[in-house]
DNA sequence: AGCTCTTCCTGAAAGC
DNA sequence: TGCTTTCAGGAAGAGC
């Protein structure tokens, strides 16, 4: 499931092979995950890919103004969200087409940029060149760039559970279920704690944990659970370093207690019941562990 | 404001 | 064995 490290891995791969190349045609399969498929197929041909960038979990392809004959004389951004099972990469036309490949961008050198997505939870949309700042502002801060002061400010006073806030892309962009759990385990904070109740030492620990976890995961080219592979088709390694996610019943790497799973913020959440102390109310009612 | 539930979708795994 | 049910989850929307 692509979160920040997986998307970063894909982006780094694409960055070495896409910039400078021009889209000559677009072929579409199923389009229910594309905002305006007809406009996409019409407006992209003739445009050159200038840069490839990650914005949270979105991949941004910055496209030039293109040939005036075919398209409005304005730069466009193609935004791709990989959802749960999305993949974006470059192949040659003779390479076998993976099942559930729904978009082909034919490039001027004959290669194809392909989008594959089994469950089609991904998204594809265009954003005008002058709207990209507004789009970026609609997302939260990059967790790898945020200062300690901003991090505290974003969470201070919030009465939602910390796990819910970590997953909220308007608060921080790019963190998903796996890295939320890994960061909370690292910081020794229970996912059901209310953000407003976290002490500043805990917030500092959490920010550092998020940075450490994401940086290590990027270095390992992401976590491959089920389907993730990078732009070249290689799986990541970070799943071997998971300390909480997916480890229900297995011993905590710190204290040996059995990792528990509970639903927090509507998501499977894995944590150590010994190292990550439950908030008082959840402990009293058994709520944090009630729904398993 | 924030929580829960529902929807989208497919394939793997569990249940019968 | 083979069919049916359940589950996983990012994001958005409804309703409370």
Image (cartoon, coloured by chain):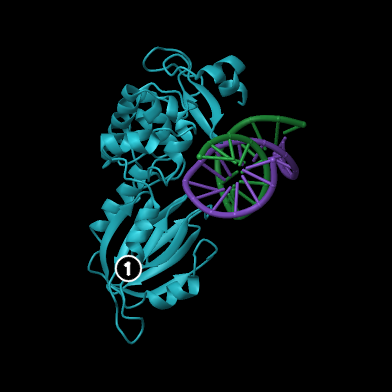
Chain colours: A cyan, B green, C purple
Q: Quadrant of the N terminus of chain A?
A: top left
Total numbered labels: 1
Q: Quadrant of residue A52?
A: bottom left
Q: Position of residue A261 (x, y in %)?
A: 53, 25
Viewed as shown, does residue A191 lie left or right of A222? right
- Residue A18: tell me if it is visible: no
- Check the image and report above or below for A41 versus A157: below
Q: Position of residue A286 (x, y in %)?
A: 60, 18
Task: Pick whichever, A222 or A141, lies toward us.
Answer: A141
Task: Pick whichever, A290 or A282, lies toward us.
Answer: A282
Q: Residue at x 25, y 38 (%)?
A: A147
Q: Position of residue A284 (x, y in %)?
A: 58, 15
Asked which secondary structure carries label 1, the reply is helix
Q: Residue at x 52, y 66 (%)?
A: A31
Q: Quadrant of the C terminus of chain A?
A: top right
- Check the image and report above or below for A274 versus A106: above
Task: Pick whichever, A194 or A187, lies toward us.
Answer: A194
- Mark 1 is surrounded, within 10 Å at the Cα level, by few (under 14), some (14 to 19) or many (20 or more) other residues, namely few
Viewed as shown, does residue A164 lie left or right of A224? right
Say which residue label 1 marks. Answer: A130
Q: Residue at x 45, y 37 (%)?
A: A165
- Check the image and report above or below for A254 versus A10: above
Q: Position of residue A129 (x, y in %)?
A: 32, 68
């Amino acid at each position: 499931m692509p979160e920040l490290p997986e998307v970063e891995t894909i982006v780094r791969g694409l960055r070495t092979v896409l910039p400078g190349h021009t889209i000559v045609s677009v072929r579409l399969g199923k389009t229910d995950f594309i905002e305006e498929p007809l406009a996409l197929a019409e407006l992209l041909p003739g445009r050159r890919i200038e840069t490839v960038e990650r914005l949270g979990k979105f991949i941004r392809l910055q496209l030039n103004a293109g040939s005036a004959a075919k398209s409005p004389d304005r730069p466009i951004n193609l935004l791709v969200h990989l959802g749960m099972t999305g993949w974006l990469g470059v192949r040659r036309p003779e390479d076998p087409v993976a099942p559930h490949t729904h978009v082909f961008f034919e490039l001027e050198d004959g290669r194809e940029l392909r989008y594959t997505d089994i469950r089609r939870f991904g998204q594809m949309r265009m954003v005008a060149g002058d709207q990209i700042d507004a789009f970026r502002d609609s997302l939260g801060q990059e967790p790898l760039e945020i200062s300690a002061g901003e991090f505290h400010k974003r969470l201070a006073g919030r009465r939602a559970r910390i796990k819910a806030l970590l997953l909220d892309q308007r608060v921080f962009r790019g963190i998903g279920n796996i890295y939320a759990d890994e960061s909370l385990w690292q910081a020794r904070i229970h996912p059901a704690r209310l953000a407003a109740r976290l002490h500043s030492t805990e917030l500092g620990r959490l920010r550092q944990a998020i940075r450490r976890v994401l940086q290590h995961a990027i270095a390992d080219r992401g976590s491959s659970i089920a389907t993730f592979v990078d732009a070249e088709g290689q799986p990541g390694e970070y799943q071997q370093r998971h300390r909480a996610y997916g480890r229900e019943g297995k011993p905590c790497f710190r204290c040996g207690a059995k990792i528990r799973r509970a639903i927090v913020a509507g998501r499977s959440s894995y944590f150590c019941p010994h190292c990550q102390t439950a908030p008082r109310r959840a402990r009293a009612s058994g709520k944090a562990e009630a729904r398993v």
